[in-house]
Image: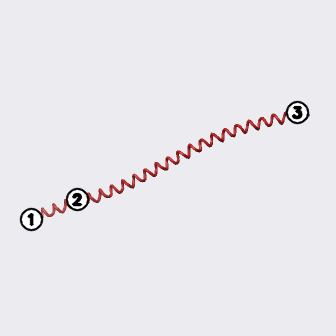
């Protein structure tokens, strides 16, 4: 009877060991996947930050282009008006 119990215990322990081995492998794979996901998120955040920086830089560049464009157009209109005034006199 004790041999039968010992045999059942051994079989049970073998199943537990196999189950533990499977769970360790699953845990390792899950950890690797989590690391890959984390790296993708970090890379995405860095890309997003870079895009935001580029957009801010583009906004500032466009702002100055707008200022100089308005200034140039104003100077051209002023010059045209002054020439028309000179012709009228």
Front residue of 62 and 39 = 39
The spot of residue 52 in percent (x, y) is: 43, 53
Helix, strand or loop at disc 1? Answer: helix
- Structural crowding at the residue carrying mark 1, measured as other residues with C-alpha within 10 Å and reported as few (<14), some (14–19) or many (≥20): few
- Structural crowding at the residue carrying mark 3, measured as other residues with C-alpha within 10 Å and reported as few (<14), some (14–19) or many (≥20): few
Color theme of the render? secondary structure
Pointers 2 and 1 in contact (C-beta within 8 Å): no
The spot of residue 18 in percent (x, y) is: 74, 35
- Distance from Cα at disc 2 to Cα at disc 1: 22 Å
Helix, strand or loop at disc 3? Answer: helix
Pointers 3 and 2 in contact (C-beta within 8 Å): no
- Structural crowding at the residue carrying mark 2, measured as other residues with C-alpha within 10 Å and reported as few (<14), some (14–19) or many (≥20): few
Q: Tell me the residue at 19%/61% (across/down).
A: 77
> In the rendered image, which residue does mark 3 sit on?
4
Q: Earlier in the sequence, mark 3 or mark 1?
A: 3
The spot of residue 9 in percent (x, y) is: 83, 36
Front residue of 77 and 62 = 62
> In the rendered image, which residue does mark 1 sit on?
88
**On the rendered structure, is 54 left or right of 73?**
right
- Distance from Cα at disc 3 to Cα at disc 2: 101 Å
Where, by quadrant of the figure, is residue 83 drawn? Answer: bottom left
The spot of residue 11 in percent (x, y) is: 81, 34
> In the rendered image, which residue does mark 2 sit on?
73
**On the rendered structure, is 3 left or right of 46?**
right
């Amino acid at each position: 009877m004790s041999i039968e119990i010992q045999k059942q215990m051994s079989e049970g322990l073998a199943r537990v060991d196999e189950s533990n081995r499977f769970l360790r492998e699953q845990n390792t794979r899950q950890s690797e996947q989590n690391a890959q996901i984390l790296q993708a998120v970090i890379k995405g955040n860095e890309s997003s930050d870079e895009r935001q920086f580029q957009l801010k830089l583009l906004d500032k560049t466009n702002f100055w282009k707008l200022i100089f464009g308005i200034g140039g157009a104003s100077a051209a209109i002023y010059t045209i008006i002054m020439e028309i005034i000179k012709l009228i006199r």
